[in-house]
Image (cartoon, grey):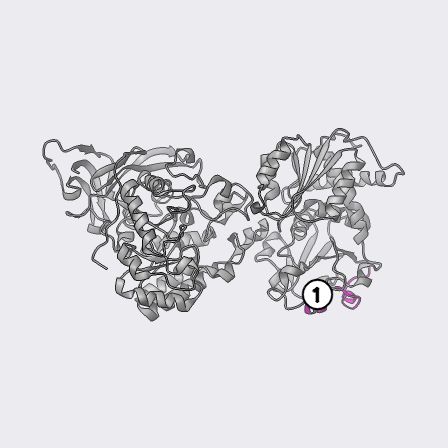
Amino acid sequence: MGWTRKDLLTMQELEPAEIGSILDTAASMKEIAAREIKKVPTLRGRTVVNLFYEPSTRTRTSFEIAGKWLSADVVNWSAPGSSAAKGESLLDTARNIAAMSPDVVVVRHGAAGAAALLAKALRCAVVNAGDGAHEHPTQALLDLLTIREKKGHLEGLSVAIVGDIARSRVARSNIHGMRKLGMTVTVAGPPTLIPPFVQELGVKVSHRLEEAIANVDVIMMLRLQQERMMGALIPSLREYARYWGLTPTSLGAARQDVLIMHPGPVNRGIEIAPEVADGPYSVILDQVANGVAVRMAVLFLLAGGKAQP
Amino acid sequence: MNALIRGGRVLDPAHDVDAVQDVLIQDGKISRLGTGLRAPDGTPTIEAGGKVVCPGFIDAHVHLREPGYEYKETVATGTKAAAAGGFTAVACMANTNPVNDNRSVTDYVLAKARSEGAVRVYPIGAVSRGLEGKELAELAELAEAGCVAFSDDGHPVMNSALLRHAMEYTLPFGLPIISHAEDAHLTGGGVMNEGAVSTELGLAGRPSAAEEVMVARDLCLAELTGAHVHIAHISTAGAVRLLRDAKARGIRVTAEVTPHHLLLTEEAVRGYDPNTKMNPPLRTKRDREALVEALADGTIDCIATDHAPHAVAEKEGDYDQAAFGIVGLETAVSLLLDRLVRPGLLDLRTLVSRLTVGPARLLNLRGGSLAAGADADVTILDLERRLTIDPRAFHSKSRNTPFDGWEVTGMPWMTLVGGRVVMWERVIKGGAGKTGARTGAS
């Protein structure tokens, strides 16, 4: 189907066919990564601004590479801190950037709804690269692409998402995307990390790792945001690792063909043991590679590409 | 000031009056009510045929922001907004800068009200010095200076012992403690109601329990001390249940509810409009329905706007950074007439009662009725007038409302304070200001 949206803000707003369209486009982009000269002229003369209010190496670099392989001019605008107290507000920054006539603004911000706010204020395309604990749609898209590649299809698959669901935009975007594509989702973690009424998003809830990961096609471990947890939401890293860390032992409960995913960066030895992260079931690096393809597809669709490259 | 208000439907719930009558005002007081009244020659006549003539509305909870935050609101602009919205008196909270925790600030607010106020102003003193919840403010002197209640509104008093002592210390003054009932640990960094919508939007939530545990605590302390505690902006069905039970047991408690908690739910937060961010947050449909029911049956004593002006820059950014609160003085009456009275959820008499005798009683004010001898504070409603809410037309300095563009039927048509017309057809009539008067001495 044709792409008609100005922005990519959430997985929640996408139709299944739109998700399929992005994944198909991304799959075709992967061929570029395999070339010796990784450059196509598709977005020549277009400008992509990466506006990151939170530190991010992986996502920002992924967007940057995606833009450059498509020949767009990519500019990184690192806004130190996210607080209005530091001076310029998000809207002021947006107005300044708008005055420079970019074609796409990729934004990451600590506040839920920040990308939608920018999208309303800017005439150019806006890509949400993470807004608070709300959504991170390109992460969900690259996760879906990875699963589809490995499993050959998506419908009917089951996924366990494990960890800090309450503060995870990755979980929210994946829940919406997976539900739309006919997958079943279980979220798992200690109750202090599970947001209230999460069942209303169409997921099951489990409070035991072994129960959650038994018999699923995909296990997605989330990064534990250690700084904000200690003492209040979980007693200690040690206890978390013991009950919620994915180790060779706990993995015994899982199926033989399970895929293990992690959006990164990994806390080795906490939510996932090194030998599992690097083990045969892990597709963590495939996720990273597919991130570039998905972001190429998104930039291509939003920056006015009409046909396949 | 003299005037004859002729031919209106006079609705004075305090005295069970609901009939087409004339109201004669002499020397700023209600002289008498009756049919076919004759006024002395030269008395201005207000033709109120087809209109509803009520005691002046009283808003027990506003933020006038002066001194200290004059860029948001002043006594002059806030009271103009009140007059435009049909209110003849407002009680203003202590979270100014400096805080109204000592008599010089109370004196300043009252002086401003005398010189620039369009309606009566009743200051509310702080419970604790600097609203810090650590030491008592100079409560006796605040009472003597004219404060009508004490509250650390916006900064819940987490120290139960301090609140207990405030209740005990102020018992002889006969003034209520107004509690902003939210447990600050449970609200944490929450910016909206905790529930399915906050989970979906990825915003940090404030659970209903944060309000309910504090209401329960306040009720226990009121029972312990015998003090009158007034629950500000009650917002949950659970808090209503606690309130109803406490009233049945004879505890001295009253409560107010805001128009926005009566009319909106957490669903309004979808879209991340910072004008849906307030404290306590918009709750669920079930809570909203419980509030309307409790307002109708008298469990909730009055409607108060929690008029909370903020500058544009404080309300236009991302949701987490935006300030809490919305303006309410200029939208409350129209919204309530249109969304509660017209659909039959609340009868007009009850609405007027909750805006007049309800707040007057809890703050021990002289107003709230049209009895002979009372101050001639009068609000006249036009129930048929249709209008579109337009923040650009507000008299308030601030525009932070979620009701922009709402089509409503019914509005305050005229406001009189002490027999003087201060608002007619949304136009403010100039003149000297007013300060309030309490019943009895303290």
Q: Split into 4 quadrants, where in the image is the N terminus of chain A? A: top right
* Position above or below: B220 against B325: below
- In the foreground, B288 or B72: B72
Residue shown at 9% from the left, 34% from the top: B40
Left or right, A89 with reference to B428: right
- In the foreground, B155 or A268: B155
- In the foreground, B366 or A167: B366
Inspect the image, locate mark 1, and give the three-letter code of the amino acid beneath it.
Trp
- In the foreground, B442 or B352: B442
* Position above or below: B268 against B102: above
Q: Is residue B233 visible?
A: yes
Q: Split into 4 quadrants, where in the image is the C terminus of chain A? A: top right
* Position above or below: B134 against A297: below
Stretch in magenta: A239-256
A248 part of magenta stretch: yes
The quarter of the displayed image where residue A117 is located: top right
The quarter of the displayed image where residue B423 is located: top left
- In percent of width and height, residue B159 lies at 43, 66
B398 part of magenta stretch: no
Q: Which residue is at the far front?
A: B104
Q: Is residue B59 visible?
A: no
Left or right, A192 with reference to B334: right
Left or right, A57 with reference to A199: right
- In percent of width and height, residue B47 lies at 20, 32
Q: Check disc 1: other Cα within 10 Å, few if <14, some if 14-19, many if 20+.
A: many
Label 1's element?
helix
- In percent of width and height, residue B341 lies at 34, 44
- In percent of width and height, residue A289 lies at 81, 46
Query: What residue is disc 1 on?
Result: A244
